[in-house]
Amino acid sequence: MSTSMLSPNSSYRIDGATPEQQALVDELASSFFVSDEKIASIIETFRQRMREGLQADGLELKMIPAFIPHRPTGRESGSFFAIDLGGTNLRILRVTLKGNSQVDIEPQKYTLSEEAKSGPLFDFVAEKIGAFLDERGLLPAKDDPPIPMGFTFSYPVNQTSLTAGTLMHWTKGITAPNCVGRDVVRLLHDSLLRRHIKVNIVAMLNDTVSTLLGSAYMHPGTQMGVIFGTGTNAAYYERLDQIPKFCAPLDDPAASEMILNIEWGGFDTRYSVLPATMHDIKLNRKSPNPFQQAYEKMISGLYLGEIVRNAALYMVDQRLLFNGRSSSILNEMWSIDTMYLTEAISDSSSDLSIVKDILEKTLGLDPTSLLDRRIFRAIAIMVGERASRLSSVGLVSTLLQRPELLEKHLIVGIDGSMYEFLPQFEERVYDTLRRFLSPDQFKNIRLILAKDCSSVGSAIAAMFYGSTRK
Ligand code: BGC
């Protein structure tokens, strides 16, 4: 590891700030700053918790078996259906694998309404599956066999087979009732049955598992599937002899490895090592899932805007920002979408006109000064920088879990809005990887944007485990 330490405050000098304002900005910058030493100790704890999660169920890092031992080759072919239920959208797709790592995708995207998120979510999914098939004239008739589909479900499931598992808890703001503790595939099948839609879920996969499969099809050499988006998590191939807690049979008795879903968002729920600030703790306490997903709440898209909101209000309350005046919108929890942070950070105009629009038009604040905008943008940068550096912790820890794979070139397939849009996210992740891996290991790693891979992976699972339907 390099011993150099990034300085917390140097990049947050605010032109025109009063000494009191600068002092408070410095205080925020140092509370959001994570030194290399701190990162090293978080990695050590993370690796320890991974090892514990391989031994037994019910621990902080759940290390959930995905029951999939296969690796795609890129030569798979045929048309398959996938359902991809994420934190923001439901996607239903027909994916044609062309046998040369290429795909054709026919997607249909449905935004999850607030009603669906807090109500009969599986009925919503079933209804949309029915509509998707109906619109294409594909609804099976009474005597037709059911259509096999892969089902990507982006929440923690205690998976007991490829097609069964109970929901442990909701994440990412979903609160749909009567689901926790119940079999997710059964819930979907029941909703489909009630609508006489003949679909058979032949595989249920976490989105990180399907991202791994899809990325491996499109980019052979992929060893990890990662999501840095609304939520965060990763999956990788673990050796079976390293998973003492797993004794169920696999469909390939000769398999020596299997995909594991780490569920890393749940890391360090008690903040024993994560550097949580008062702004994180406030968010955590008021979130729909208090004291769960502590790591996720410091790095993923659903939460960064809220951390910035808390930190900005902290300055407002001391009359050092926006003339000490908030707005009814800024006073509301979750009113800052992380997309606005991305835009604010990217604003390079001399009068910060994008930040101005966000503050005045979107958040309804009274006319702001350039100084207000500079401070707001600085807070967004601090929170984004910390998220990028902490995101690398999970990557480094997982890569070091299979050091033999680091001896060759390997690809990490990453999807999600943080990775795709947050300015400098990728550079900072590479920078942290460089500091915490050896040069020989670091040079073998390539991060790629695994766009659509989650859906492709779900279709690949439908191919592995269902019958082809062209
Ligand atoms: C869920 C994971 C999921 C991740 C990324 C988290 O909130 O617990 O299962 O993989 O979000 O979507």
Image: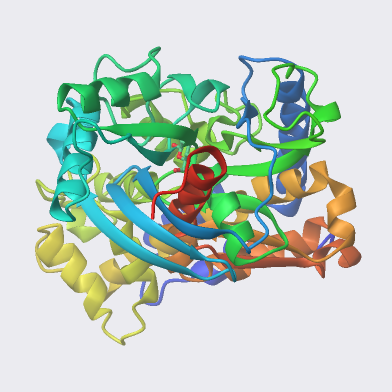
Out of 259 and 300, give the one closest to the viewer.
Answer: 259
Query: Residue lying farthest bottom?
Result: 350
Out of 296 and 82, give the one closest to the viewer.
Answer: 82
Q: Is residue 300 above or below residue 13?
A: above
Query: Residue lying farthest front?
Result: 143
Question: Relative to residue 181, is residue 296 drawn left or right?
Answer: right
Q: Is residue 38 above or below residue 52?
A: below
Q: Position of residue 32 (x, y in %)?
A: 53, 50
Question: Relative to residue 124, is residue 265 drawn left or right?
Answer: right
Q: Which quadrant does the N terminus fall into? A: bottom right
Give the mark count.
0
Task: Please identify the quarter of the rendering in which residue 238 is found.
Answer: top right
Q: Position of residue 374 (x, y in %)?
A: 34, 71
Q: Position of residue 385 (x, y in %)?
A: 53, 60
Q: Which quadrant does the C terminus fall into? A: bottom left
Residue 307 seen in the current view: no
**Residue drawn at point x = 24 percent, y = 55 percent:** 109
Q: Position of residue 69 (x, y in %)?
A: 70, 38
Out of 40 and 277, give the one closest to the viewer.
Answer: 40
Out of 262 and 149, give the one closest to the viewer.
Answer: 149
Q: Is residue 420 above or below residue 312?
A: below
Q: Is residue 446 above or below residue 68?
A: below
Question: Relative to residue 98, is residue 248 drawn left or right?
Answer: right
**Residue drawn at point x = 45 percent, y = 59 percent:** 418
Q: Please name the colour scheme applied to the rendered image.
A: rainbow
**Residue drawn at point x = 59 percent, y = 59 percent:** 76
Residue 406 seen in the current view: yes
Question: Relative to residue 367, is residue 210 drawn left or right?
Answer: right
